[in-house]
Amino acid sequence: MKDFELGAIQERFADIVWANEPIASGDLAKICERELSWKRPTTYTVLRKLCEKGLLQNKDGIVTSLVSHEEFYSAKSEQIIEDSYKGSLPAFIAAFIAKKNISADEADEIQKMIDAFKKEG
């Protein structure tokens, strides 16, 4: 997958598209006016930039994503781990749980994911 560098505003805009797609570009502009206090030209400028990056497409006035919400945030998470923890998932998890206690239910859920991965893997 491409490496998508998005600023906070572009990411928020993409979240709006993912939550509403497929969406007519005019309806998207109305949502952005309501939720982001943007004027129509701002919406179309950000949309054009995200289309140029290959994240979204605007075909015949209908906006859809070319990369799913899950794919985008999965890649973003991988990049954070790569950049901050030299690609070490255990180092990331250790740092994460050192600052935030996880519940027994969360620990069980994580253990189930690990067990399922071991069976598949």
Image (spheres, grey):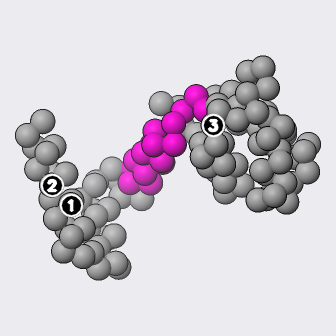
Task: Tell me residue 75's x, y (percent).
Answer: 45, 43
Q: Residues within 10 Å of mark 2 (few under 14, many from 20)?
A: few
Residue 14 lies in the magenta-colored region: no
> To which quarter of the image does residue 34 belong?
bottom right
Of labels 1 and 3, earlier in sequence is 3
Q: Nearer the viewer, residue 89 or 20?
A: 20
Percent coordinates x, y for residue 98 in the rendering: 29, 77
* Circle 1: residue type: Glu
Q: Which residues are magenta?
A: 65-82
Q: Tell whether 49 sits left or right of 22.
A: right
Q: Is 53 placed above or below 72 here?
A: above
Q: Which mark is residue 112?
A: 2
Residue at image point 42% right, 59% down: 84
Element assignment for label 3: loop
Dividing the image into 4 quarters, which one contains the C terminus?
top left
Tell me how many marks there are: 3
Distance from Cα at disc 1 to Cα at disc 3:
30 Å
- Between 95 and 21, the residue placed more toward the observer is 21
Specify whether residue 77 is in view: yes
Main SS category, magenta section: helix
User: Where does label 1 land, which residue?
Assistant: 109
Q: Residue at x 58, y 28 (%)?
A: 66
Residue 21, label in figure: 3
Callout 1: 10 Å neighbours few (<14), some, many (20+)? few
Mark whose residue sits in front, 1 or 3:
3
Q: Amino acid at mark 2?
A: Lys
For mark 2, give the secondary structure: helix
| Residue located at (51% from left, 42% from top) | 69
How many residues crowd around disc 3 within 10 Å: few (fewer than 14), some, or many (20 or more)?
A: some
Assess whether mark 2 and mark 1 are in contact (beta carbons under 8 angstroms): yes
Mark 3 is on which residue type? Glu
